[in-house]
Image: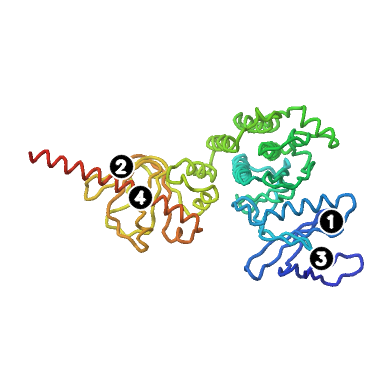
Amino acid sequence: MDISRAPAAPGVIPAMHKIGKYEVIKEIGKGATSAVYQAYDPFQNRQVAIKVVFPEALGDKEHGKRYRKLFVTEASLAGKLSHPHIVTIYDAVAEDEANYIVMEYVDGTTLEQYTYLDGMLPIQKILEIIYKCGRALDYAARQGVIHRDIKPANILLAGESDIKISDFGAALTLAAETTQVSGVGSPAYMSPEQVKEQSLTHQTDIFSLGVVMYQLLTGRLPFQGTNNYSMIYQIINVDPPPPSQLRSDIPQRIDEIVMRALKKNTANRYQTWEEFAHDLVAALGTQEKPDRGFAESEKFDMLRKLEFFRQFTDVELWEVLRLSTWHKHPRDTVLIHEGDIGSSFFILVSGEVKVVKQDRLLNILKAGECFGEMAYLGKQKFQRSASVVALSGITVIEIRAENLSKASDLCRHHFHGAFLELLVDRLAMANTRLSQLLADRNISIF
């Protein structure tokens, strides 16, 4: 295995040129057991991050076996977790000469810098971050993976709102038949059941994410101690003060969310990620928004409730958000004009619209229904056969046919399935109307 280094002066760590087939750009982080490099993958033409485990760590007499187990756990997830808010693991190499993991490169920073009083984020942004983390961890849990080490250092923020959860080395893989490493994680963020080394479920990650949320909101940890033992005592026995006692602009609703996530008894904690997400979206709805638009978490929650997207996975729904443009329109807005040429189709999120042809009412569509889909199914610029007019204030998403054509195969597959169901329903409705019309004519004849 080729891990080449440049010559270095005595006492200086040599620079690395290549790690296997990857061309090293620079070192971007280093810990006690590993270093992380930004590198270039010439075969896939993309930048990657590579975590290289130090040989001396794996060979350590006291902890080597533990470090190797953590490495193998993370490496085993290569290609298994595919979610927009989880760092993708592309490849892993475990050989005598080299042990490293190749993963998605995220051009951003961890949440650690936002856990201090002089660097705290706006409340709305914190709710967005926690919501996205919760969705990602819900996805992981449904794949049988519990992270076990959720903390600000393992959550990356790129740009304004792109969240990525990283470092699944401590993960508990429920389907694995091998013995899991116990006692892993960062004490300040551990759940009571984790510090007691009891059996764990997804609720341990809910607790840890609650700790992160508390810290982002207040600039301090909910459980503090001069050493790990006193901190563990607090985690098991002491309830922290509500965040609003430390930051006056935090509303009671957010207090309730954080404190429920931090319940020591799992019976009183959020039972599912869905419950947690629902309360976060509700709290987001009460926060002031500069542009009065929808937060991404609100959009996601709206789509998840629509019948049209019933078969879409969370991953595909996030993709829909990236493909679509959201609009709010008042009553009587004409969204489609009969005879126009169009390349977009629309999905009604809220409100009602009417479909009209030559001033004759053809149909009334409600939330969750689609219109203009022939612009995509026709595979060319399509002349609209009817007009669509808002009957009330509406929220609608617009997707351009050319954008959907560039979507993932699975995303397009589910759109095709939804369109097929839609066409079948409309044909059945047309047949019913035709039968009724013929029946009416027969009655009038006799």
Residue that protrudes farthest toward the front in the picture: 177
Q: Crowdedness of circle 1 by 10 Å Cα count: few (<14), some, many (20+)?
A: some
Disc 1 vs disc 2: which is toward the camera?
1
Q: Position of residue 359 (x, y in %)?
A: 22, 47
Q: Which mark is residue 371?
A: 4
Q: Which mark is residue 401?
A: none
Q: How many marks?
A: 4
Q: Amino acid at mark 2?
A: Ile
The span from disc 4 to disc 3 (Cα, nearest Å) is 59 Å
Q: Crowdedness of circle 3 by 10 Å Cα count: few (<14), some, many (20+)?
A: few
Q: Secondary structure at mark 4?
A: strand
Disc 3 vs disc 2: which is toward the camera?
3
157 or 247: which is nearer to us? 157
Q: Amino acid at mark 3?
A: Glu
**Location of residue 244 by image quarter:** top right
The span from disc 4 to disc 2 (Cα, nearest Å) is 11 Å
Q: Which mark is residue 97?
A: 3
In the depicted structure, whether residue 39 falls above or below residue 347: below
In the depicted structure, whether residue 339 falls above or below residue 174: below
